[in-house]
Amino acid sequence: MGSAQFGPYLLDAVLARGGSATVYRARDTSHDERVVAVKVFDRRLSADPGFRERFRRDAGLLSALREPHVVPIHRYGEIDGHLYLDMRLVRGPSLADVLRRGRLAPQRAEAIAGQIGAAVDALRRGGLGDRRIERSDVLLAGGPGRGEFVQLVGLGLGRPPVQAAVSPTALVSRPARHRRLVASTAAVLVVAALVAWAVFPRDRERVGEPSAATGLVATIGVPDAGLLDAAVVSVGGRRLLAGVTADGALRTWDLSTGAEAGPATPGDAVAVATAVVDGRAVAVVRRRDNTVVARDLETGTPLGPPMGTPREYSFGRLVVVEVDGEPVVVALEPTGRQLPGPFDMTEEQVGVSSFALRAGAPAGPVLAADGASIDAFSVTEIDGRPVVVSSTAGGGGVQARDLRTGAPVGAPTAPQPVAFRALTTAVRDGVPVAVTGGDDNTVRIWDLRTGEQVGAPLAGHVESVTAVVAVQQDGRTVLITAGGSDLSPTPQVRFWELATGTPLGPPMTDHPLSRGFRALSPDGSLLLTTAPGEPVAVWDAKQLVAEVAS
């Protein structure tokens, strides 16, 4: 993007974008062109009286804080209806980026946890309470070793303090199933960081919860880099996991053994889907330049020229579905149109494209929402027609469109006050429905023909619903939902009867699936969990449902 004026700031690059705010690299023209990071909050959130009051209180406390491990606030306020923070620009990777490359050495973990602990202590003493801190909020300046310096950003300003803080130990070490430590002083936290590298006893199982091993199909050790995306394909009774790692390589694993099924294919892949074409397993890979290439999964050989138009960056996710007996690739794709953004800027609109896999030609038009970008989609069938069901950024609602013609199918839902974090499709009493999970901690079911909500929201999660899948089991459809992240203090997996909206069994807490999952197969029967520095785990969703229902 070109520079855009925001009060005294010239915004020249987007550093991070979230559901409620965007962080820009900017030049402060009122302070000798000082280069800073400016966090600009969404106009709707900025207008909320409760948020405004908390934001001004928190920002005032933070700007008065003198803690070297918390990024300094230069100033804060409101410009053109947007609340904003002007912060020091920190150059360096986040802790999340570092952990994707593998676990930290104990000495390095100790040093980082100690610095985080000092910051957490200072926040409490400064009146800010326990703030929710994610790995992406921990920035690491300098190189590994004694010169590495931690600074915290984010901190959820304007949000109420959390009830149960995540410990610095959890941030730097294995995230699943260890005891949570909430420390009151930095000295205790340094000791806790060392303890975290011991083997913690497994939490005592809660009454009614499945064992942590229930439904576990395989654990996969991903070498050298974290897993960006994965999908499952079955050929000749053999189930293979195809995955792309952060170094761009395409790898395969045999799910019966968890071992790699062949050599890696180097490349620049960012996402993958799978299909069986003419009896052979095919990996459909999205590359960093946004083009799509089909490869023989056993040999890595391309099966045709790249599909799509090369671009400077990739839009990621894709799936392969069958349309009229032919495999079709469906993926997020720019529409070629510009949308108005904040501060007189424009943003490229994102839609959904489709390509016939064998021919490499478009299978239909690029599908777009009116005046918004699509951020999630699912492919289903309504009245015999292949349909793309999509949600738009910022809670714009759900719409179904014919994949081949782009024509609307049924009615769209009304715009929503909160962003959807998860989307899937299913059939309820013969009616095609969309199922969404959102930032209001609820799951909603929508009639795709009428656009109306079906029944009351499914409530019970205590954090944003980040994953949802529909699984067929014994003639019924069960929804599996996750609320929380790998660092949440209260993550849950819940099970629901789709037909009635009632809970099925108790929620699972502190289970690897509770921190988020993705479906590896179109029927949702296989789920994938990952965590930085941890093995990939594949789970049998039907076995989990059977255990919960028994």
Image: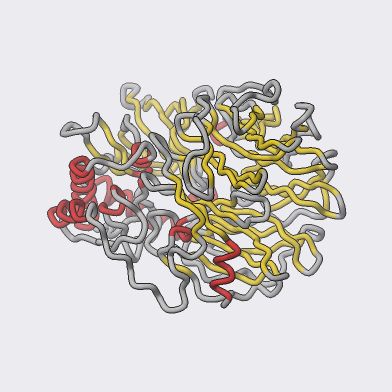
Q: In terms of depth relative to the viewer, which is nearer, 14 or 278?
A: 278
Residue 412 position, x and y percent, is 76, 53
Q: Quadrant of the N terminus?
A: top right
Q: Quadrant of residue 221?
A: top left
Which residue does the image show at 52% across and 47% down from the upper left?
19
Q: Quadrant of the C terminus?
A: bottom right
Residue 523 position, x and y percent, is 67, 55
Which residue does the image show at 45% across and 50% down from the upper left?
219
| Residue 393 seen in this snapshot | no
| Residue 78 seen in this snapshot | yes
Q: In terms of depth relative to the viewer, which is nearer, 366 or 298?
A: 298
Looking at the image, residue 153 sits to the left or right of residue 286; the answer is left
Looking at the image, residue 159 sits to the left or right of residue 381; the answer is left
Residue 169 position, x and y percent, is 26, 53
Looking at the image, residue 174 sits to the left or right of residue 306; the answer is left
Looking at the image, residue 400 sits to the left or right of residue 65; the answer is right
- What colour scheme governs how the chains and residues are painted in the rendered image of this protein? secondary structure
Location of residue 478 with respect to 316 vertically, above or below = below
Residue 263 position, x and y percent, is 50, 30
Location of residue 312 with respect to 240 vertically, above or below = above
Q: Quadrant of residue 407?
A: top right
Which residue does the image show at 31% across and 57% down from the upper left?
166
Q: Quadrant of residue 273?
A: top right
- Residue positioned most to the front: 236
Q: In terms of depth relative to the viewer, which is nearer, 531 or 39?
A: 531
Question: Number of numbered discs present?
Answer: 0
Which residue does the image show at 39% across and 25% down from the upper left?
27
